[in-house]
Amino acid sequence: MIKRISLFFASRKSWTLPYVLFSAVFVVIPLLLIVVYAFTDDNGTITLSNFSKFFMHQEAINTFVYSIGIAIITTAICILIGYPAAWILSNSKLNSSRTLVVLFILPMWVNILVRTLATVALFDFFAVPLGEGALIFGMVYNFLPFMIYPIYNTLQKMDRSYIEAAQDLGATPVQVFVKAIIPLSMPGVMSGVMMVFMPTISTFAIAELLTMNNIKLFGTTIQENINNSMWNYGAALSLIMLLLIAATSVFNTDDKDNSNEGGGLW
């Protein structure tokens, strides 16, 4: 009996059981419930009325489009700031200390709500009005580390032989950066895009705090419907958002595959 128990715990597959159970209870079952609620009404009858309600509700569509716009702007700014920061952190000539890396990554370990409340306090101290500008600033501030880290990690693990080959072929530093470094770092960039775009489009706490609830994002709309016990409509909106995130994930995967297959420097 003892031997059987030891063999059971020695098996690597047994260690995945807690993860499988956790995923089933907290991921799979909630997703199934969202699908069930989205395609049923209050009486449990199968219907598409929840989705037709969304497409006939102009305010909900405007909020959805606006949220995508905010997510795109936030992601673009994070790339513009995050890529140079990741490049500096990964370059031993520019950054010889690991302390700077830790300082950039440290905000990832702090709760987003805490960081947002700190931002609100900072804006209040300097008498900066809350609104759309504050919202974008808060989004970038909260999600910038999630852009920096995957790009930094990719740049750190990059095969330097491609860069050396480009230099041997007489490429200028700009050509090396554009033709070699950027294509090789694209998997990290796309991972960063996913890690910024997905939470930006689904968050509601940041918008509520940094706009005094004057600007509504799609996540806020979902929250309001669920809080008002409109479970079916809220589930339909959640499913629409999940489909958008899934489509972004598929695009991200395809782009990674294309960047990995594009072998030549020129």
Image: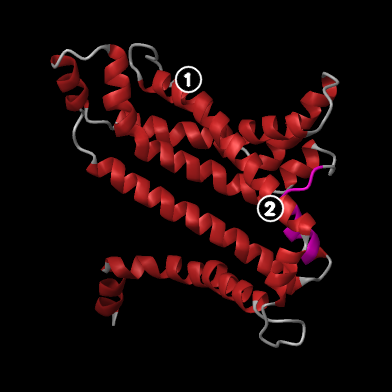
In the image, what residue occupies the spot 71% across and 64% down?
Answer: 55
Q: Quadrant of the C terminus?
A: top left
Q: Which one is nearer the viewer's eye here, 59 or 145?
A: 59
Q: Which amino acid, by three-letter code, is at mark 2?
A: Phe
163 lies above or below 132: above
Q: Contact (CB < 8 A) between labels 2 and 1? A: no
The answer for how far apart the CA atoms under marks 2 and 1 are is: 37 Å
SS state under label 1: helix
Q: Residues within 10 Å of mark 1 (few under 14, many from 20)?
A: few
Q: Quadrant of residue 17?
A: bottom left
Q: Position of residue 13 (x, y in %)?
A: 30, 69
In the image, what residue occupies the spot 71% across and 38% down?
Answer: 114
Determine if the magenta segment contains residue 223.
yes
Mark nearest the camera among 2 and 1 is 2
- Please state if 188 lies on the left or on the right of 241 as rendered: left
Q: Quadrant of the N terminus?
A: bottom left
Q: Which residues are magenta?
A: 215-226
Residue with the mark numbered 2: 64
Q: Which amino acid, by three-letter code, is at mark 1?
A: Leu
Q: Which one is nearer the viewer's eye here, 233 or 199?
A: 233
Q: Decide if residue 91 is in sight here.
A: yes
In the image, what residue occupies the spot 81% across and 71% down?
Answer: 229
Specify which label sits upstream in the sequence, 2 or 1.
2
Q: Quadrant of residue 136?
A: top right
Residue with the mark numbered 1: 100
Determine if the magenta segment contains residue 93.
no
* Residue 180: assigned label: none
